Each structure stands twice: as C-alpha cells, then as structure tokens.
C-alpha cells in the first residue's frame, strides 16, 4: 500500500486515487480535493459534502442514515445550509437539534423554521452551566435526547473542553468537527477521539480561516450500517 496506488473510476469523470492514506479527487486533469482517508466504502464516491459557507461537513453515505435519527448541530454562525442540505438529501429522515448563542435572532429562527423537522435553542455550548451557557448533558436532558446518530460541532475553540465530555455520554455514528488552531492540543484531541473508537475519514483546511480544519469521523460500530471497509486506522 505504501508504494502503490489503488484507483477507481466513478461517475462524472471523477477519478479517485488512494495513495498513502489520502483520497485525491481528479476531474479533467485538476485535483479538486484531497483528504485523508482511513476507510473505503463499497461505493467510494458516497462521501457527500454538505456545505456551510466556507466550511464543509463531509457525511458518509447520508442515504443510509436510519429513519428518525437524531442529528445534533452545535454552533450555526447564522448558517443553516448544513441542516437544509442534509434534510434534502435524506428526504427529511432526521430530527435535527440546533444550538447557538444567536439562536434567538430573527434571521436564524426564520431560516431554521423553513427546514422540516428541526428544533432550535439559544445556547452557548460550554463545560459549565451559567445563564445562556449549557453543558452538553444539560442540553440532551432538556430536549429528551438519548441517542445520537450524527453530531456536527463548530463552537470556536470550545471543542477542546466540550467534546471529551460529550464522548463520555454519547457515541454517535458520525462526527463532523471543526477544530480551531494548530497545536499539540489539537493532536491530543484527535487522539482522544480515536481512542473512543472513531476512524478519521476526511479532513480539510477551512477555505476562509486557514488556522481551522474540518474533520469527519465514523465509529467502528457503524461500519456495517454505512458499508465501510476498514483499511488502516489513520490516527493510531
């Protein structure tokens, strides 16, 4: 594997090449995206990117998300294209709970109200409860959530404190995470996620803020559900 490439031609003249643990998409001679990969699906082109402004949230085979699954979206930044795109792709199969400190603003409330099966709460997600700041377990209790299929988190550097707490309580099948900053703390957080049984399937530098990076993970218990064939665990 280290000295060879496995290539697969898929639809829309896109060539997927698996080289040294990276997935490179080439279209008409141009590299259009290159991401880290530690798994291959039986239909490898099913890595679907749901855009949110400058951010991207790659979701593995969203058409296989079970009906009535719970999706958590922590941090909206007044953008709801992730939620709208996911519901469009899955034909409104999910119940989406969004949390943002700006959740009471008219624009955000209106945009969220246009998306089927969504719930919006004004909340700053933190490691303690105070005024409009809530811990993850408090929010789950408030909304009577006991199981989570997909979790997206973009909470402006608070992920270092919040995500470890979340992983103790929940084990979503997929995690989409924006990590802010590049440091040993970032490496330690990624390793901690891996130790909880998650495999890195994608990472991409934020197109607008280059000190931030988007990561997507899938839990090993969800491999069969999402038709994943593991190759090697990238973070271990």
Image: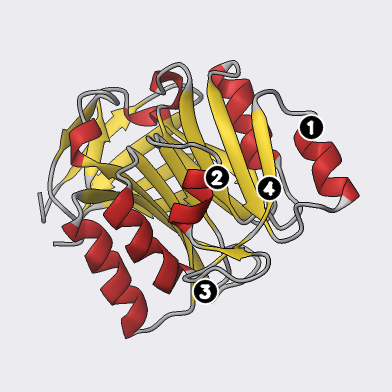
Drawn side of residue 188 relative to residue 95, left or right: left
Label 1 element class: helix
Disc 3 marks which residue? 157
Q: Which of marks 3 and 2 is nearer the N terminus?
A: 2
Of the two numbered discs 3 and 1 in the rendering, the one whose residue sits closer to the viewer:
1
Q: Which of marks 1 and 4 is nearer the N terminus?
A: 1
Residue 213 in view, yes or no: yes
Q: Residues within 10 Å of mark 3 (few under 14, many from 20)?
A: few
Label 4 element class: strand
Q: Which of marks 2 and 4 is nearer the N terminus?
A: 4
Q: Position of residue 224 (x, y in %)?
A: 20, 24
In this view of the protein, which residue sits in the foreground, 41 or 137?
A: 137
Q: Where is residue 140 in the image (x, y as percent from the top left)?
A: 48, 46
Give the colour scheme shown: secondary structure
Disc 1 marks which residue? 113
Give the mark count.
4
In this view of the protein, which residue sits in the foreground, 150 or 44?
A: 150
User: Circles 2 and 4: CB distance less than 8 Å?
Assistant: yes
Cα–Cα span, label 1 and label 4:
12 Å
149 shown above or below 24: above
Q: Residues within 10 Å of mark 4 (few under 14, many from 20)?
A: some
Q: Position of residue 19 (x, y in %)?
A: 23, 50
Residue 31 in view, yes or no: no
Label 3 element class: loop
Q: Where is residue 48 in the image (x, y as percent from the top left)?
A: 48, 34
- In the rendered structure, find residue 142 and report the number of the disc placed on it: 2
In this view of the protein, which residue sits in the foreground, 207 or 228?
A: 228
């Amino acid at each position: 594997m280290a000295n060879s490439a496995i290539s697969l031609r898929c639809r829309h003249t896109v060539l997927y090449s698996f080289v040294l643990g990276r997935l490179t998409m080439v279209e008409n001679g141009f590299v259009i995206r290159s991401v880290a990969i530690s798994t291959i699906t039986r239909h490898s082109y099913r890595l679907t990117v749901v855009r949110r402004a400058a951010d991207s949230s790659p979701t593995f085979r969203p058409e296989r998300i079970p009906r009535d699954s719970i999706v958590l979206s922590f941090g909206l930044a007044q953008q709801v294209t992730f939620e709208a795109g996911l519901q469009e792709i899955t034909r409104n199969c999910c119940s989406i709970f969004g949390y943002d400190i700006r959740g009471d603003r008219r624009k955000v409330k209106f945009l969220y109200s246009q998306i089927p099966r969504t719930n919006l709460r004004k909340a700053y997600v933190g490691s303690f409860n105070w005024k409009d700041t809530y811990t993850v377990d408090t929010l789950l209790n408030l909304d009577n959530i006991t199981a989570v299929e997909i979790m997206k988190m973009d909470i402006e550097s608070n992920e270092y404190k919040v995500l470890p707490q979340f992983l103790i309580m929940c084990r979503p099948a997929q995690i989409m995470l924006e990590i802010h900053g590049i440091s040993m703390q970032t490496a330690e957080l990624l390793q901690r996620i891996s130790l909880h049984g998650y495999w890195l399937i994608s990472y991409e530098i934020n197109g607008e803020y280059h000190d931030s990076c988007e990561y997507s993970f899938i839990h090993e218990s969800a491999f069969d559900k999402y038709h994943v064939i593991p190759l090697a665990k990238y973070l271990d």
